[in-house]
Image (cartoon, helix red, strand yellow):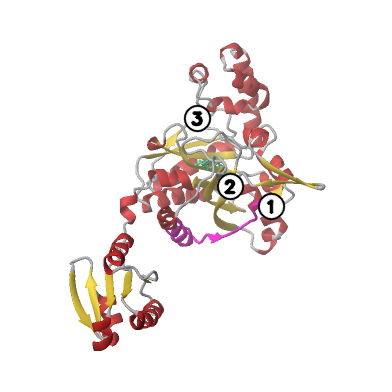
Amino acid sequence: MLKRVPGTKDILPDEVSRWQKIEETARSVFSCYNYREIRPPLIEQAALFNRSLGESTEVIQKQMFIIKKDEDELALRPEATASIVRAYIENNLDKTEGLVKYYYLGPMFRYERPQKGRLRQFHHLGCEVIGADEPASDVEVIELADHILKTLKITGYTIKLNSLGCQNDKAAFTQGLRTLLKNRESQLCADCQVRLNQNVLRILDCKNDACRAVIATIPTDHSYLCADCTAHFASVRRGLDLLSVSYTVSPHLVRGLDYYTRTVFEISHSGLGAQDALGAGGRYDTLVKDLGGPEVGAIGFAFGMERLLLVYDQTQDAQPNSLVYIISMNDAAQEWGMRLQMQLRKSGIPCDSNYQNKSLKGAMRHAAKLGARFVLLLGEDEVKKQVITVKDMNVGKQQELTEDMLAATLKTS
Ligand code: HAM
């Protein structure tokens, strides 16, 4: 039998209701902050990601799903920020709208080694603010992420915050770090010895014990930040304090994508195990220009939906089931049942029935399995008397109702 691709999931209906709860909550929070939804395509020119995320990043080096067709080299998107910046430029949104605030939900693809919380097809719930240079935008975006988690009643997470500085600061920091670590190259793991030449900042992220011991000795004073970036970072922290958003400054926090400048943040959760990032984001002040657009600042974040689901308490979304289940015991009752079902559905009452002509016992069992709140029994007697036997499954009581009393009674019970 053919099986699903490793690292992908079938999201079955029982689980879909939890997805919808998170999606609905996020949508309503985003709209309170005046963010509008954007839906870029799932495939893009591979070059878009190569140029945006950085040639030496792990995503580009190892994780891209590439599709080659004739002259085209296309990629399944590994993330949405680059696509949204492309859409912003291609649709002239800088000229028509200036500052934009967008949110998005949808699948992303990375060819990773699957494990708990790490998939090859996963979903992002994220947002991007483009055309925003002020620290107030950083504060808004981080507080927004915090607000979504609070609304979902997720606890036990930490917001880690850092500033990488502008391009110049980042280059100076990278150079300083390389010089410092060159002397200790032999103490680093094999991967970090490669990173030393290709992507030195990622060494700060290495989980290897020997590397961690070296990293612990690296100064954490943000002395590489210029005056503007120092002031920006201070304003972001002040704003978060003002809004009572808890965070920890993590001077070694770097992100796996090259486009970040200045503010970066990661939201980790102790309940997630090795892949503990619930979400992450930051500023990318040079990306819009690098992709051919105007010189404007931007910031955003993305949560991993599957990871949110791992820490989301499912007991909260238990909603009372209002399903009505119709059991028709003969042909005449069947026709009445079909008409009744249509009317109830049209008046907004969820309704299902026993199409399969089961025995009363079998049909009652099916109703119970579906968690029906009410069962409507239509048998010979009911057809004759033109009444419907309504059984309230919560209390186990039943009563006879005429058809014109039915909808109102079901709605008010
Ligand atoms: P990212 O850190 O690569 O950032 O991904 C964001 C989140 O997606 C992660 O924190 C994690 O929760 C989830 N995630 C990443 N890879 C996987 C995977 N293989 N399986 C399951 N979940 C995963 C970005 O992609 C940026 N575009 C975020 C951003 C938006 N920065 C600015 N704007």
**CB under 8 Å between discs 2 and 1:** no
Q: Which residues are magenta?
A: 23-43
Q: Secondary structure at mark 1?
A: helix
Question: Mark 2 or 1 closer to N-term?
Answer: 1
Residue type highlighted by circle 1:
Arg
Q: Secondary structure at mark 3?
A: loop
Task: Estimate the x, y position of residue 401 in percent, counting from the top left.
Answer: 23, 83
- Mark 2 residue crowding within 10 angstroms, few (<14) / some (14–19) / many (20+): some
- Up/down of 293 relative to 172, above or below: below
Residue lying at 56% horizontally and 12% vertically, measured from the top left:
187
Label at residue 251: 3
Residue lying at 58% horizontally and 32% vertically, measured from the top left:
225
Task: Estimate the x, y position of residue 240 in percent, counting from the top left.
Answer: 43, 45
Question: Mark 3 or 1 closer to N-term?
Answer: 1
Label at residue 108: 2
Q: Disc 2 beta carbon < 8 A from ligand 1?
A: yes
- Up/down of 57 relative to 24, above or below: above
- Which mark's residue is nearer the viewer, 2 or 1? 2
Q: Residue furthest right?
A: 71
- Which mark's residue is nearer the viewer, 3 or 2? 2
Residue type highlighted by circle 3:
Pro
Label at residue 86: 1
